Image (cartoon, helix red, strand yellow):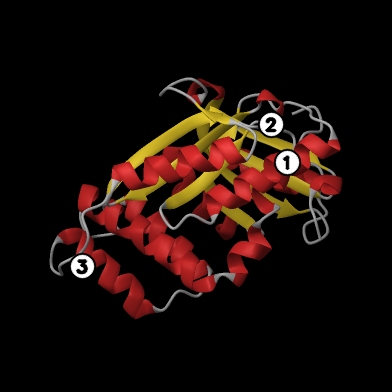
Amino acid sequence: MAGHSHSANIAVRKGKQDAQRAKLFSKLSRYIIIAARNGGGDPDTNLRLRYAIDKARSVSMPRDNIERAVKKGTGELAGETLDEINYEGYGPGGVAILVEAMTDNRNRTGGEVRTAFEKGGGNIGTPGCVGYLFERKGLFVISAKKFPDEDAVMTAALEAEADDFNRVDAVFEVTCDASKFVGVQEKLIAAGIVADEADVRNLAKTQVDVDVETGKRILRLIDVLDNNDDVQNVYTNANITAEMVDD
């Protein structure tokens, strides 16, 4: 990782997302609906649904909201028809931007995403133009202050069948195959290690360094995209640093 932090790229906007609780719940509900629709309503046999529910619980989403989303996904309750779609493009400085969306109107969402790219100093591309620069991975960010024994954390991660372990500044980053996320998480918890951040993400295979001003422009574009109700996640291969994040 050469000192580049995946966790920095996914955590810079977490505070803003948590502040917009209703919007976050809406996005998580859509994720649960899609997971239940594609794999059934039993989280014990549908790992994607289990992950979605665990994520919803981690931000204190009410149980009724979760159950209602599952029932919409399985067809027990009427709900909107959602499609999953990815948009790919380039941000300021030519960095890669990957947008995951769930929408009931592809034309509306596509137009809004295209406008956001153009106004943000980037441009939307064709399917596949940047997707190959990312890989789907489980990521666990573990505080070195809470768990100072690096050897013990690394051993637990490897025994949990994680793919990689790195220390970046004050955190340990553990990555695994996306399909093993739940299992790795359970084994880490069983070993007494609870991550500050645990998620399945599209991580950049290689991160690109940009200057501070370009980084700020990239983050402004990401914020605009992320504020769209249909957008679930936004990823970039830009190496985001602390000085790029506005207070």
User: Which residue, given by chain and number where applicable, does mark 3 sit on?
Assistant: 71
x then y, percent, for residue 100 = 44, 42
For the residue marked with disc 1, what is the amino acid? Arg
Name the residue beneath numbered marker 1. 217
Report if the CB atoms under discs 2 and 1 are less than 8 Å apart: yes
Question: Mark 1 packing: few (<14 Cα in 10 Å), some, or many (20+)?
Answer: some
Which residue position holds label 2?
92
Q: Which residue is drawn at 52% across and 68% down?
A: 58
**Which structural element holds mark 3?**
helix
Give the answer, above or below, for where 29 lies relative to 179: below
Specify the quadrant that holds the N terminus. top right
In-front residue for pair 124/95: 124
Q: Is residue 194 visible?
A: no
Q: Where is residue 117 in the image (x, y as percent from the top left)?
A: 55, 37
Task: Name the residue type under label 2.
Answer: Pro
| N-term mark: 1 or 3 | 3
